[in-house]
Image: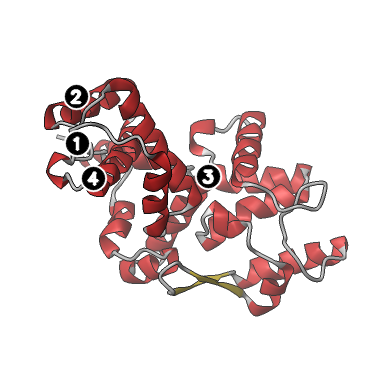
């Protein structure tokens, strides 16, 4: 089957499925990559494309590309050519999560050295479980309420709670800034920070404070929130609600121990 090159029509198809702009761009990128390699859609070419991705990219990127490719197959009504995702081991996934020790150390050093905004960025991420896109929607008004309500694309309301101790300290910070309304996290021009900017700055602080930069990124603190929550209050169904997971199976990843935790357990328990 000849490869369709009508990108405008395919873009409209993706947008009709209520995907985010970033996801649409990603899926179009996957389509263009396939298009640069093959001129026809066949099952054999689809398998070659999967093998090509696996040989050149890390598993998470491979799955992102395959997801976009499978959407294209649905668009041209060739679902039988769909390619399976690659399996990602849960332990290696959790190995890239910041430790509680490093999380607390990072907070402590940012509070001491400043700028204070980044101390609160880390604390909000680690204490609320918010995604970075959600973090940047927090406003001064939410501190008095103690939570922020967000509406998903499906019309579902997700409430992100802000712990009382964080609300009180952040409110004091806002008073010093004379900020009564508006976004909490802004740049020097007063515009909201961007997810990319947050990720970049966190990496810089990781290097400065000699913390493994592979574990310091916005989503890492969401993982830390989940792991800490289950250790304090072992209710995976409630955690799924707090994180906004539609399926509790998505949340079960946090029941898995990291490689270092497994090693420590073995060293402590096995003496024979």
109 up-or-down from 167: above or below = above
Whether residue 57 appears in this view of the structure is: no
- Looking at the image, residue 152 sits to the left or right of residue 89; the answer is right
Give the numbered dot on residue 1: none
The answer to which of marks 2 and 4 sits earlier in the sequence is 2
- Looking at the image, residue 151 sits to the left or right of residue 73; the answer is right
User: Closest to the observer: 195 or 114?
Assistant: 195
Residue at disc 3, secondary structure: helix
Provide the residue designation for mark 2.
Answer: 48
Disc 4 to disc 3, C-alpha distance:
50 Å
Query: CB atoms at circles 2 and 1 under 8 Å apart?
Result: no
Classify 10 Å Cα crowding around label 2: few (below 14), some (14-19), many (20 and above). some
Whether residue 50 appears in this view of the structure is: yes
Classify 10 Å Cα crowding around label 1: few (below 14), some (14-19), many (20 and above). few
Provide the residue designation for mark 1.
Answer: 271
The answer to which of marks 3 and 1 sits earlier in the sequence is 3
- Count numbered badges in the picture: 4
Q: Nearer the viewer, mark 3 or mark 2?
A: 2
Provide the residue designation for mark 3.
Answer: 101
Q: Position of residue 129 (x, y in %)?
A: 50, 59
Q: Position of residue 146 (x, y in %)?
A: 62, 75
Q: Nearer the viewer, mark 4 or mark 3?
A: 4
x 78%, y 70%: residue: 181
Provide the residue designation for mark 4.
Answer: 76
- Looking at the image, residue 122 sits to the left or right of residue 9; the answer is right
x 44%, y 74%: residue: 155
């Amino acid at each position: 089957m000849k490869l369709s090159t009508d990108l405008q029509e395919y873009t409209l198809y993706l947008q009709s499925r209520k995907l985010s702009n970033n996801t649409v761009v990603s899926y179009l990128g996957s389509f263009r990559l396939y298009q640069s390699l093959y001129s026809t859609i066949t099952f054999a070419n689809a398998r070659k494309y999967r093998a090509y991705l696996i040989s050149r990219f890390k598993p998470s990127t491979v799955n992102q590309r395959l997801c976009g490719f499978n959407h294209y197959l649905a668009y041209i009504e060739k679902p039988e050519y769909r390619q399976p995702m690659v399996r990602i081991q849960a332990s290696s996934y959790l190995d890239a999560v910041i430790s509680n020790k490093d999380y607390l150390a990072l907070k402590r050093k940012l509070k001491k050295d400043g700028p204070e905004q980044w101390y609160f960025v880390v604390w909000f991420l680690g204490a609320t479980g918010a995604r970075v896109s959600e973090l940047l929607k927090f406003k001064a008004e939410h501190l008095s309420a103690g939570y922020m309500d967000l509406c998903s694309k499906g019309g579902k309301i997700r409430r992100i709670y802000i712990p009382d101790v964080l609300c009180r300290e952040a409110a004091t910070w806002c008073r010093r800034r004379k900020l009564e309304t508006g976004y909490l996290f802004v740049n020097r021009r007063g515009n909201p920070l961007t997810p990319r900017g947050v990720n970049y700055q966190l990496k810089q602080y990781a290097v400065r404070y000699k913390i493994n930069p592979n574990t310091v990124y916005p989503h890492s603190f969401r993982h830390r929130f989940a792991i800490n929550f289950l250790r304090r209050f072992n209710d995976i169904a409630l955690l799924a609600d707090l994180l906004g997971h539609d399926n509790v199976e998505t949340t079960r990843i946090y029941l898995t121990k990291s490689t270092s935790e497994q090693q420590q357990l073995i060293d402590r328990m096995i003496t024979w």
